Amino acid sequence: MKPAEHFKSYCRFWKPSMARRITFYFFIFGLIVFFITTMLYMGGTRKHFIGSTSQLINHQFSLMESAQTADFIWKGLGNPNPELNQLFQILANISSSFYTVSDIAIYAKEAGDTIWYRIFFDADKVLHLNPAQISFAQKLDRNLERHFEKPGLMARSANEHALFVNITKDNDLNTYFLKIGIGSENFVGIMKKEAKWIALIFFIALCLSRFLGYYFARKIARPIENLSEISTNVAKGDLTQMAPVKSGDEIGELSTNFNKMVEGLREWESIKKIEFELEKGREIQREFLPSQIPKLPNWEIATCFYPAGQVSGDFYDVFMLPDGNVGLVIADVCDKGVGSALYMALFRSLIRVFAEQAIHCSGPERTQIQTATEHSERTLPPTNGPRARLEAVSSTNNYIAHIHGRECMFATLFFGVLNPTTGTLSYVNGGHEPLYIINAGYIKDRLKPTGPAVGLMPDITFTAQEIQLDPGDLLVGYTDGVTDARSPEGELYTRDRLQSLLSQPFNSASETIERVKANLFAFIDIAARGDDVTMLAVQRASVTP
């Protein structure tokens, strides 16, 4: 008989027929099947719920950085734990048509102790503990005494059911269970307290026939089973899985929230990959900085480099030239981030290459370095070694402007060639912050810019100058990350503050760098650094009597 005819015959109760008798037998048979299928369904759903939730929670804990530390929960008492609090919030927001999460906490027992404690977040998101509820503590003790592992266990008290997931790691000394409390009114308690509604549902379901009842049972169970299977795959690390959303009810809402959680995990994984790549870039960039500063008799060279982010546009360089002179570079590439870091490497390499090869490739017909005479500075001979080395600035400028002009990338750059024997410093300052020459707490001179920033446009003429570093003189260079640093109140560090600090007596170049660094970071305090901090100090030893 077709379902429509069967239903029509069943509704005509005033007419005796074989169909009604068959319906009666089917009713009895369906009642038995219904109770069996209901028990199997509830048991299967319970098993799926415990298993999938346990796997999901343990997977989430494996992704937490703080969870790699043994007993990180017990050690974190009295302190906030953003990662754990975020996981609590995610679990608290998960709900289904059967239950609503009423409590999230961690039950812990210290090694060698017999008392269970309930660990929870207070209103300020700080971890605290209280003695645990006795009924739950006894249940956990019995579970541990069975000497076999389960993905989780269910327990109940007078007003709630609770799922306990064992989150104890191999390196933990204490025992930990994550508790997800579920109000009895919204879970199994519904079956007990609302028995009349369950009986009515039984009657209606059986009246719609065994096949329709089976169909609707599968209609409810299928999304839960699918979600359980998908969550298992997600727990194993397959973030390509998505739960199908086929309805607007609680199951559809649960699937939607689950998909949002998976999307969040994908974003988190992408961020971790980006952070990993940035960390690799940071390590590569550090390789471009000199690993060892040349050691020169009667000279001390000290440096300081603190990038504001993973990568930096600032750089310094100290390198020996073939003629025995020393190249000194401090520069700041415009912009921030990966782009400036790439150009930092390019500027640094070009200056080195052009400076080392300048003697062979320079000539009067292509020079763009002028000489100047001011007070202590003097005109450089047109073909001397330092002047030829300084042609590296012009060559770098033309290369950047011609080849990479579209990107509009430039750098403020100081390049000096120091003769360690005579103390003569020949230099070009391409738009960089003035460098200070100090002796005995007195600022003797400022090496101001002798040309524009490097890379702005081709064929720029830079002025080369020369100055004498006497015994005891200290040359200090820095980037604008020092003078433009801000305090938590938004106040600038300023050049005046730096000059005042440099005017104080000093014993060495390294002491001066450490003094400025300590003062600067104390000024910044908890404020975010908006720019890189780079400093270079070169001191000629004083003449001993």
Image (cartoon, rainbow, N blue to C red):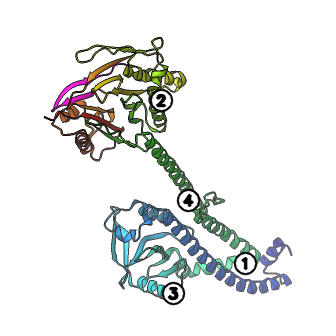
Q: What distance separates the C-alpha of mark 2 from that of mark 1?
A: 90 Å
The amino acid on which the numbered mark 2 sits, given as a three-letter code, is Val
Q: Mark 3 points at which residue?
A: 147
From what the image shows, is residue 246 above or below residue 328?
below
Q: Can residue 255 be seen by looking at this rendering?
A: yes
Q: What distance separates the C-alpha of mark 4 from that of mark 2?
A: 57 Å
Q: What distance separates the C-alpha of mark 3 from that of mark 2?
A: 70 Å
Residue extending furthest toward the top: 365
Label ID, residue 257: 4
What is the secondary structure assignment of the residue under circle 1? helix
Label ID, residue 353: 2
Q: What distance separates the C-alpha of mark 1 from that of mark 4?
A: 35 Å
User: The magenta stretch spans which residues?
Assistant: 434-451
What is the secondary structure assignment of the residue under circle 2? helix
Q: What distance separates the C-alpha of mark 4 from that of mark 3?
A: 36 Å
The earlier-in-sequence mark between 4 and 3 is: 3
Query: Is 208 placed left or right of 487 in the picture?
Result: right
The amino acid on which the numbered mark 1 sits, given as a three-letter code, is Cys
